[in-house]
Every structure is written in C-alpha cells, then in structure tokens.
Image (cartoon, grey):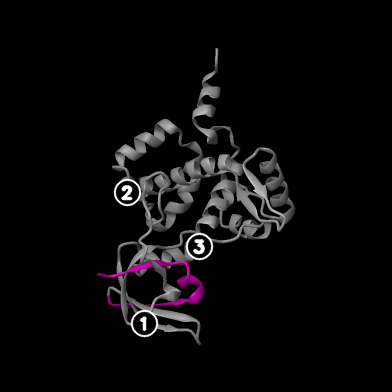
Amino acid sequence: MTSSRTNNTENDPSARLSRGAENYLLSIFRLAEQDRRVTATVLAEQLKLVPEDERVGTSLPSVGGMIRRMVREGLVETTKDKEVLLTPSGRRSAEIMVRRHRLAERLVVDLLGLELHLAHIEAHRLEHAISAALEAKIVAALSNPTTCPFGHPIPGSGHTRDRRSVTLDHAPSDAAFVIDTIPEDNQTLLRYMVENGLIPGRSIIIVEAAIARGVVTLECEGNPVVFSYDVASKIWASPKT
C-alpha cells in the first residue's frame, strides 16, 4: 500500500524539499526573473534578503555546499563558467514555491489586512506550510489572482508583463506612467515606497532623469519622490494611456 506521504510527494514535487532548498529555489527563480546571471556569489547576496528566522547560510562555502547538494538532487546544474541554472525538475519546484509565496502575500494583504511592507516577510514563513489542497482554497478565496501585491506575476496564472513596460531608469522625462511592479526585499525601501503611494496601479510622472547625478525624480499623487538609478532600475512601469 502506498503511503499518503508518497502520494503527496508524487503530486507535489516541493513536498520532498527541505526548507533551505525551497528558499534557494525561490531565490534562483527570482534572480532569473530579473534577467540576472546566477552564480554562487550573486546567490549568496540574494539569500541575505531572506528573513533571519529562515536560517539560510549565506557564506560562500555554505552556498557552494548547498548548490552541490541540489545538483545531486537534480534541481540545478552548473555551467563551465559557474552559472547556476534550474533543471526542468528544479524549475517545476521553484514555480510551486514562488506561486505559494505570492499567493501568501495576497492572502495576508487582501484577506487579513496586513500592512503591505510586512507581507513579503510573512509570506516567507507561510510558503513552506501551504499544501496543494490549501493552495487551491486560497486561489478560490482570492478569485484566482494573477499578481502578488507588488505586481509580480503568480506562476501558473497566465499573467504576462505589459510589453511596453520599462524600468524607471529608462523612462523619459515629462512622461506619465502607471507602476507595474516594485521590489519587495528591502523593508526600509518598501516602507518608503508605500508611504509615498508608490504601489502597483498608481500613476506617476517622471519629472527628471538626471543621469549625471544618478537620480530619478518623479511625482506621485502630487508628491515629489527621488530615487537612485539603482532603485529606479527595480521599478517597472507602463506608459499611461
């Protein structure tokens, strides 16, 4: 007789993963989503953004050891130039984790009323405990959302980014845009964005893109907001029509 644990593992590849592996898969997926080349060094920096209570090792030896373990488990592969890539199996598991993380963000914000700047941290704690059955209930309760509260697509929802969308460091001055996505890892930055109304769906005007000074000045609901080019490169927006 086949155990329920075996059935759950076959139906849900993420059921066999450790919490550490889940956090690695989520981080690798998100870096690839940003078109960033994933190496052990880049991954170590990304993992530092995972909440402290997740207890993920971020030293290069620790990251290298986990990558080797994930290679043995068929979740990732490495290239000759040390790039880390998801295997088909790893991608399936990563998509499940990212989907549950972003559904958890929706759950705590839309149904429980949690402040937006706290949603990412709470979702990290919840994502590991969401089963396939609970995921289906959350999707139904939220009427099948396609993006997380920060505008990022929920895998499996069919959502695609507007082809006209650009990062704000490439947006022209004196142009009106609608925010599509904002970064969620840096809690201080996220709180600043929320306090200034810089959330998905809000209209903004690019006042000035000062390349020489390395800053972008925009207006959101009548309030001036200034960002470095680095921050601006992480905010996506579409031309307002």
The magenta segment? 222-241
Can residue 85 be found in the magenta stretch? Answer: no
Can residue 229 be found in the magenta stretch? Answer: yes
Residue 41, image x and y in percent?
67, 60
User: Which is more toward the observer, 68 or 184?
Assistant: 68
State the mark number for residue 38.
none
User: Which is more toward the observer, 118 or 72?
Assistant: 72
Q: Which quadrant: the C terminus?
A: bottom left
Among the two numbered marks 3 and 1 on one chain, the one whose residue lies closer to the N terminus: 1
- Mark 1 to mark 2 CA distance (whole Å): 34 Å
Q: Is residue 3 above or below residue 135?
A: above
State the mark number for residue 110.
2
User: Which is more toward the observer, 4 or 109?
Assistant: 4
Q: Is residue 34 above or below residue 169?
A: above
Horizontal side of 146 relative to 4 (left or right) equals left
Identity, as a three-letter code, of the amino acid under mark 2: Asp
Q: Judging from the image, what secondary structure is the residue with disc 3 in? A: loop
Q: Judging from the image, what secondary structure is the residue with disc 1 in? A: loop
Residue 61, image x and y in percent?
74, 52
Identity, as a three-letter code, of the amino acid under mark 3: Asn
The quadrant holding residue 239 is: bottom left
